Amino acid sequence: MPELPEVETVRRRLAPHVEGRAIAAVEVRDARLTGHDDPRRVEERLAGRVIPALDRRGKYLLFRLEGGDTLISHLRMTGNWLMPAAGEPAHARARVELADGTELWYADARRFGTWDLLADEEAAVYLDARLGPEPIGDGFDGAVLRDAFRGRTAPVKALLLDQRLVAGIGNIYADEALNAACIHPDTPAGRLRRAQLDVLAAEVRAALLEGIRSQGSSIRDFRSPEGGYGSMQERFRVYGRDGEPCPACGTAIVKTRCAGRGTHLCPGCQRRPRGMRRRSRALERA
């Protein structure tokens, strides 16, 4: 599933092609894409509109439209915005033609992605109800996690995945950040100490920024708009590496389950939380 780094990669690669350009025509081929909204109505409302800016919030891509509307695109599991050189891609659900002739295709093999065309004020309410703070923003630190986790007994990984608490983190980057912070995913979030939360916030930010620098991770479906592959999968510490040695201590990485999700961890670096007996190396460095 595309997470914050993948969506930000799409935004950065698409922005030079769409910002300041007008939409000439839109073709929605799958009525499920626009949900409760009629696809013909969405096509009509988008045609002729200029896109002053392409933004991102969490895992949502935001096409800002002149006149005060926003097209909110949620890629979900397999969604991709593509500009293929060889014409229509597989699993195309919609086509957007810009005034300069550029064609954008929205492709989505599993058809879970959505478009919501809302007035700017409605879009702000929609996003604020679903999303917490941005983890790569300047204000994201251990204090933000302390406020989010205070008194909570749920596993820390489950709360990192809760988009209402922190926007944009998915399964991959939660595993990577928790490993780097030497925190077991099952640790009750409210039991984490101030220093641990400071380190975890820093590692969340570091993992996401590394993902952006690597243009995301292309494990199965994710591609850049030009069809290229991200390289973050080559830099994973634990995700997808079960049975391989931990790069920090050499212990075999294991795959387990936490919060109903497949979870990768190092049993040597991330001890199960029995009294939090082991100090993490990250804390010892802090």
Image (spheres, rainbow, N blue to C red):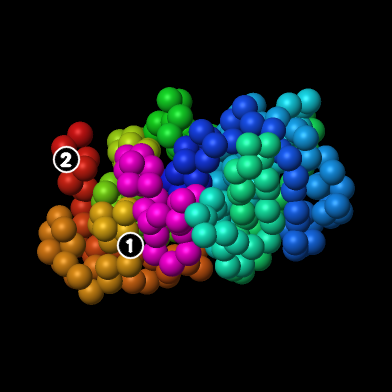
Of 272 and 97, the residue lying toward us: 97
Of 268 and 232, the residue lying toward us: 232
Horizontal and vertical percent position of residue 286: 20, 34
Name the side, left or right, on which 234 lies relative to 261.
left
Q: Amino acid at mark 1?
A: Tyr
In magenta, the rendered stretch is 206-230
**Residue 93: which quarter of the image?**
bottom right
The residue drawn where x is 60% and y is 61% is 88
| Residue found at the far bottom of this picture | 243
SS class, disc 1: loop
For the residues marked 2 and 1, what is the alpha-carbon distance in whole angstroms? 24 Å
Q: Which residue is mark 2?
A: 284
Of 267 and 224, the residue lying toward us: 224
Q: Main secondary structure of the magenta part?
A: loop
Q: Earlier in the sequence, mark 2 or mark 1?
A: 1
Name the disc covering residue 239, or none. Answer: 1
Horizontal and vertical percent position of residue 36: 84, 55
Within-10-Å neighbours for mark 1: few <14, some 14–19, many 20+: many
| Residue found at the far left of this picture | 250
Name the side, left or right, on which 194 lies relative to 132.
left
Horizontal and vertical percent position of residue 90: 58, 67
Of 96 and 170, the residue lying toward us: 96
Q: Is residue 17 magenta?
A: no
The residue drawn where x is 68% and y is 48% is 96
Name the side, left or right, on which 223 lies relative to 250.
right
The residue drawn where x is 40% and y is 54% is 228
Q: Amino acid at mark 2?
A: Glu
Name the side, left or right, on which 235 lies relative to 205.
left
